[in-house]
Amino acid sequence: LNKAPSKILSIGVAVAFATTLFVTANARMRVQAHPQHSTAALPTLRIDYWAGGKGKLAKTLDPALITETAQADTVAMVQANLVYIGVDDKVHLGLAQKYTVSKDRKTYTFFIRPNARYSNGDYVTAKDIEQSIYEALLPSTASPVAGSYMGEIVGATELNTGKATSLPGVKVLAKLELQVRLTQPFAYFLKTFTYPTSDALDQKIVAGKTRNAANNFLTTNCPGNVGAGPFKFKCVGNDFYPSGQTPSYTLVPNPYYYGKKPKIQVVMPAIDTRETSYNTYLANGIDTTVVPSAYISKWKGNKQFHVSPTSVVVYAATNQHAAPFDNVHCRIAVAYAIDRNTIANKVLHGAVKPIYDIVPPGFLGYYDGKDNPHYSVAKAKAELAQCPGRSTPITYVYDTTGSDSDNRSAAFVQMLNAVGFNAKLKAITANDWLSIVSSGFGGMSKSQTQIVFDDWQQDYPDPQDYAELLMDCNQDYNIGGWCNAKYHSLMQKADVEGNAKKRAQDYIQAQHIAISEGAWVTEYNSLSFYLIKPNVHGIVPTVAYGDLVPVNYDWSKVTVGK
Amino acid sequence: MANLIAFVLRRLVAMIVVVYLIATIVFFLAHASPYDPIRLNLGQHAANKVAYANYAHLFGLDKPEWRQYTDYVGGLLHGQLGYSEGQDTWGQPVWDLLKHGVPVSLKLGGYALILSLIVGLPIGLISALKQNSIVDHGSQFFVMVAYAVPVFVLIPLAQLLFAVRLGWLPVTGWGTPGLEGYKEMILPVSLFAAGLAGFFAKSFRSFMLEVLSQDYIRTAKAKGLRQRLVIYRHAFRNTLLPLASIVGPTVAFLIVGAFIIETFFSIPGIGLTTVDSVISSDYPVIEATTLILAVFVVVINMLTDIFYAMVDPRVRL
């Protein structure tokens, strides 16, 4: 390159480089020039459903694929089901104006409201719901939960496992009449049926579209989310929010909603961390936030501060197939060794409540567990004396998610050592922890884990979701592998027991068997702590939902003042 | 000009080979991870064997690894990057994640780079010219603070001061239209630029001191040339080469280097997506972001080489 062209080339390449940088850097600016939605018409509630989600919104909005609370609660604002769980954790009528149950309690007939319409004005039909349930169960949809939540329906398991191509248990009787037949008179069926997997989807919109997780139509296509719930998404073309902006959902009232229509719009920004959400609340960027545990004491007594019980139970699972916890005395020694009050009130600063049973407070079958092991050093030592593998070194494994989990686990191990165990602590990542607790029946043996922290939150508000799924023989979620014939028969009986009182007694009796054998070492039930701005009225924390929702799940009562 | 075209073509051919090799290496490295993306995604529901098997089949993870590799390379040749297997983005097209995120990261990084050069170079220059003076020591102190204090320490402090206490700026957010959008940019761009500015100031001071001690500078001064001409015509121009050698790679890594900033300020760039993809064994996103970074590095290196040739006649393309 000689000197003269070099100068021209220098200038040219420099300009090209700078232009490339600026053009790419400013590309979003031009995209943002798309028309923005007017938000002036309705008061706006800015809620933090998506706080702590690493800046991401839902990985799925398809009711068939939902497994997490924030997804479920967001979808519940847009989609609707025949029945739903109220904030009282009981089943309420949704799209169904009534339902009947046959004498043998195996056939349910739902009558759909004539005024039930989707947000595009289409009427909800029984055919829509039949098809929605069918597609949720198809193996090609690969729903992680449909087989579990609708497996009681005749033919559902066969369809879900690819052994059949039809679903004989769901039948359209008339345009607004749907019949669902069960293999047995499962007492908890209606509760599992409230799960989004059976939400009504407008078949005129979703027919032929991708329902599985790969490039899911509803997750990637905002206008496709045509639901019969109280809200609809405000879309920007096919997107949920303008490209280049912080992700957020904006929901506006569904003009065709069958119930009282909301008088607000809701904005749900994706906020990376809970701490950032809290700071954003303090700076008036959002109207609600979860309170990080470090700030709970600061807010107690303030009008903005709200506490709620949750359905989260925390326990220690022991490996029943390896020393020392293959022996009942060794397991019970652990149950006596743990001072739950100290963990709840001192270690975790009152953010949790000790429990002594399996199902959480407020559930059918919950009881105080007075007959189950409580903290007693003397009894723990006595049981440990009868434990053949008492000198076996044991490792308590937990997933480290912050100082609370570290402190709680350290206290747990100290308490074990205080009664004579030779215990140590092993902190692992959430990924490693998941590989232990999601490895199926007796999965702890595969990883040679002796005792591990575990927790569970309701899928539906029924003791079966806890007592049977987590502790009964051969259940996928029974990671310790404990199996007891009497317990199993009680679970089978409770499944189909129509009398609620008798059913509760079955669960109480079963829980006592499991806990008194040390199969499940109870710890505590978590609480939720929220801040709500004083100008926001009508939303409450509940057990039923993991987020703040309207009183009586009536969004028309939620107001946002100035 | 013919030399330039031949040079660019050679680099483009090399880029294809480099990209293919990187794609292959990253594919097998990612798949060597002990973590199971299905288990991570399904959480405790992974215990459901039917659900697990359905998911594995849907994403082709039940196929032998060599088959997954040929599918992946075949997809690349057809311009398909596949679907995310990350915990928070499972099933979303990788291209969708990147096409929204890359421009955002470029914008954040581009503004931060420009700001850091605007601030860092004059500080470095003044420090060099006033070597060992109070101005030099003072500016070096602030440069070290900006460079050494981790950004994750500065961010919460800045958010608490400017957003929570003073209420001047929003805590988080990005891309809101109008004035609010500019306000949203101030903290993340400034904090991202702070470290870079410190780095550039410190480096530029060294480069300038090196050049100022050269014989040709002394000769220029001896000829009676004015100080300004000595600095700008002789010294500054000769610092451009070493400066380009540090700015080039910095530009290449700006695209994924802002993940902490993006995390704290809820900025929808790909820095955070990249880090998340590694944590959650999101093979397709790991592979795609690595490829983008590789292409970016190759292109920036090519531009840097061209720039070298422009400013230094001794360099031949």
Image (spheres, rainbow, N blue to C red):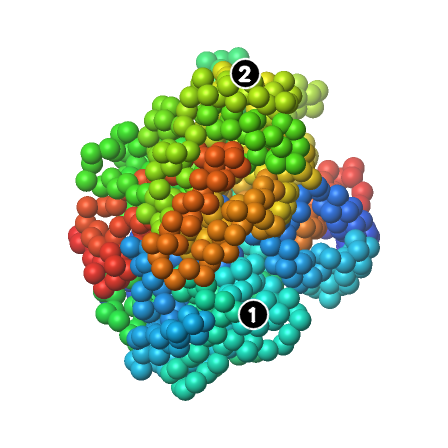
Percent x, y of residue B120: 52, 31
Q: Determine the residue positioned at 32% across, 47% down.
A: A362
Which of the 4 image quarters holds residue A392? Answer: top right
Task: Please name the amino acid that badge 1 sits on.
Answer: Ala
SS class, disc 2:
loop
- Quarter of the image that includes the N terminus of chain B: bottom right
Q: Residue furthest bottom?
A: A174
- Does residue B109 show up? yes
Q: Are marks 1 and 2 in contact (CB under 8 Å)?
A: no
Q: Determine the residue positioned at 70% across, 20% down.
A: B215
Percent x, y of residue A80: 38, 69
Judging depth in this view, the residue of A304 and B55 nearest the camera is B55
Percent x, y of residue A116: 33, 77
Q: Is residue B2 above or below residue A158?
A: above
Q: Is residue A167 above or below residue B140?
A: below
SS class, disc 1:
helix
* Residue underneath mark 2: A420
* Residue underneath mark 1: A156
Q: Count neighbours of disc 2 (C-alpha within 10 A) and say few if under 14, some if 14 to 19, many if 20 or more.
A: some
Residues behind callouts 1 and 2 on a single chain: yes
Q: Which of pointers 1 and 2 indicates the residue nearer the eye?
A: 2
Task: Please name the amino acid that badge 2 sits on.
Answer: Gly
Q: Is residue B240 above or below residue A57?
A: above
Is A445 left or right of A32, judged from the image as shown? right
First of labels 1, 2 by sequence position? 1
**Chain letter belonging to callout 2:** A
**Chain letter belonging to callout 1:** A
Q: Determine the residue positioned at 55% across, 27% down.
A: A329
